[in-house]
Amino acid sequence: MSLSKNRIIDFLSKCIPFIYAIYIPLSFYLYVYGSLTGDICGMYGYFIDISRILVILLFSSYVVRTYDLEKKNPSKHFVIFAGISILEIVFAVCIHGKCHSYGMLLTFVYFIFFAAEIMAESIAISQLQKNDELEGKKTWSAMNITIIIIAFCWIMFGNYKSSIIYFFMCVIMLLIPRELIRVCLVLEYAYGKKKGESSKEGES
């Protein structure tokens, strides 16, 4: 009985990186969809956010157990990522029903949360990779910084027409490749490393 439980726990643990790689971008696009259309009510939005935080913390726990270098363990950056998301939920609850009173200030505060979350995750995922994988790390970091700059310009200087242009620039040229890179980096860390270790064991 205990052996079957251990197998189930081991299987679920192995699924955590895959869930993280898929659900984090999915929750972001659900949030954007709900904001633009109003089809996702407040309670469902909070459920998406809370689930997102749990997924981040589960992946942080996975990294604690699997990362090689204890002193440079990037799990703390995933915890920071989750903490920023929690602060965003608290802020959203506090200003619920008062959105029209804040105007541009509210948009700028949400941009700060957006930028902080992107940077926290960017640092965390970059540290998952080894030093000999600098090209992927540089591409990942550069895309995140570019997205933050474009989002800032969109908020500060955009009008309706330019907003549409910026939207398609982000989605087609940056956001979609960024999500693919995230999936590759996370899954490479979680599953690629184990393949390498197993091949070394076979050689020995």
Image: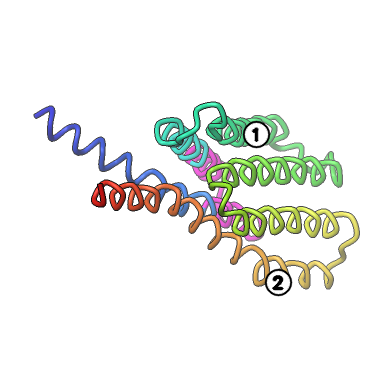
Q: Which residues are magenta?
A: 27-51
Q: Secondary structure at mark 2?
A: helix
Q: Is residue 146 above or below residue 64?
A: below
| Residue occupying the point 77% across, 41% down | 112
Q: Earlier in the sequence, mark 1 or mark 2?
A: 1
User: Residue 176: which quarter of the image?
Assistant: bottom right
Q: Is residue 146 above or below residue 106?
A: below
The three-letter amino acid code for the residue at tag 1 is Ile
The three-letter amino acid code for the residue at tag 2 is Phe
Q: Which residue is mark 1?
A: 84
| Residue occupying the point 82% across, 60% down | 154
Q: Residue furthest right?
A: 157
Q: How many numbered markers are drawn?
A: 2
Query: Quarter holding the N terminus?
Result: top left
Q: Is residue 116 left or right of residue 56?
A: right
The picture places residue 86, in percent across and down from the top left corner, at: 60, 31
Q: Is residue 83 left or right of residue 116?
A: left
Query: What is the number of the mark on residue 168?
Result: 2
